[in-house]
Image (cartoon, rainbow, N blue to C red):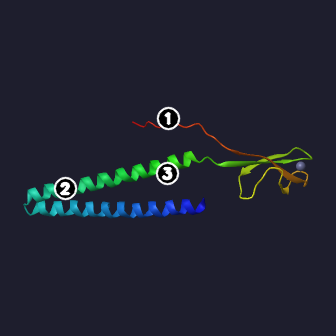
């Protein structure tokens, strides 16, 4: 699971690099547009400014889409929760699932009475999805 997520990060960081390059090139295009406008080449300036704004617009759009996709992925995989209970005093503690957790496994001692605590439940927290329409 961690292998897959690191791969995703690698892909998105590459995509991010491409976006940054496109963004930088677009800024250069706008700069060139301004200089060619000053030298009187208005048609060239017009084209360059069009390219520049298209580049900035599309890179921002892709960045926004990527952000939305990562948010959606995070929503698809809700966290797994482990419930630990003390058999002696009934003290209950909830924490994030850790590798190797299983029901009836004895874990860390109770905070109240120092008795060994036992995992009583492992469940996936399902949060209600927010409406995805933004516009
Ligand atoms: Zn206890």
**Disc 3 from disc 1: Cα separation:** 16 Å
Q: Residues within 10 Å of mark 3 (few under 14, many from 20)?
A: some
Q: Where is residue 12? Give x, y as percent.
A: 45, 60
Q: Relative to 26, is 97 on the left or the right? A: right
**Disc 1 from disc 2: Cα separation:** 37 Å
Q: Where is residue 8? Give x, y as percent.
A: 50, 59
Q: Residues within 10 Å of mark 1 (few under 14, many from 20)?
A: few
**Disc 3 from disc 2: Cα separation:** 32 Å
Q: Where is residue 106? Give x, y as percent.
A: 85, 55
**Element at badge 3?**
helix
Q: Name the one closer to the observer, 40 or 119.
A: 119
First along the sequence among labels 3 and 2: 2
Q: Where is residue 6? Give x, y as percent.
A: 54, 63
**Element at badge 1?**
loop
Q: Which residue is mark 2?
A: 49
**129 relative to 4, above or below:** above
View extreme (left): residue: 40
Q: Relative to 130, is 51 on the left or the right? A: left
Q: Name the one closer to the observer, 63 or 35.
A: 63
Q: Which residue is mark 3?
A: 70
Q: Residue at x 40, y 50 (%)?
A: 64
First along the sequence among labels 3 and 1: 3
Q: Which residue is mark 1?
A: 131
Q: Name the one closer to the observer, 90 or 40.
A: 90
**111 relative to 22, above or below:** above
Labelled pair 1, 2 in contact (Cβ < 8 Å)? no
Foreground mark, 1 or 2? 1
* Quarter of image, res 4: bottom right
Foreground mark, 3 or 2? 3
Q: Relative to 114, is 7 on the left or the right? A: left
């Amino acid at each position: 699971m961690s292998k897959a997520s690191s791969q995703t990060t690698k892909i998105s960081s590459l995509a991010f690099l491409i976006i940054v390059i496109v963004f930088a090139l677009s800024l250069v295009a706008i700069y060139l547009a301004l200089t060619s406008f000053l030298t009187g080449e208005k048609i060239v300036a017009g084209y360059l400014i069009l390219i520049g704004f298209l580049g900035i617009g599309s890179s921002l759009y892709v960045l926004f889409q990527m952000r939305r996709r990562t948010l959606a992925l995070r929503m698809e995989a809700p966290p797994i929760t482990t419930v630990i209970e003390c058999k002696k005093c009934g003290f209950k503690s909830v924490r994030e699932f850790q590798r190797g957790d299983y029901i009836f496994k004895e874990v860390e001692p109770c905070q109240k009475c120092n008795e060994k605590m036992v995992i009583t439940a492992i469940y996936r927290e399902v949060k209600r999805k927010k409406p995805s329409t933004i516009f």
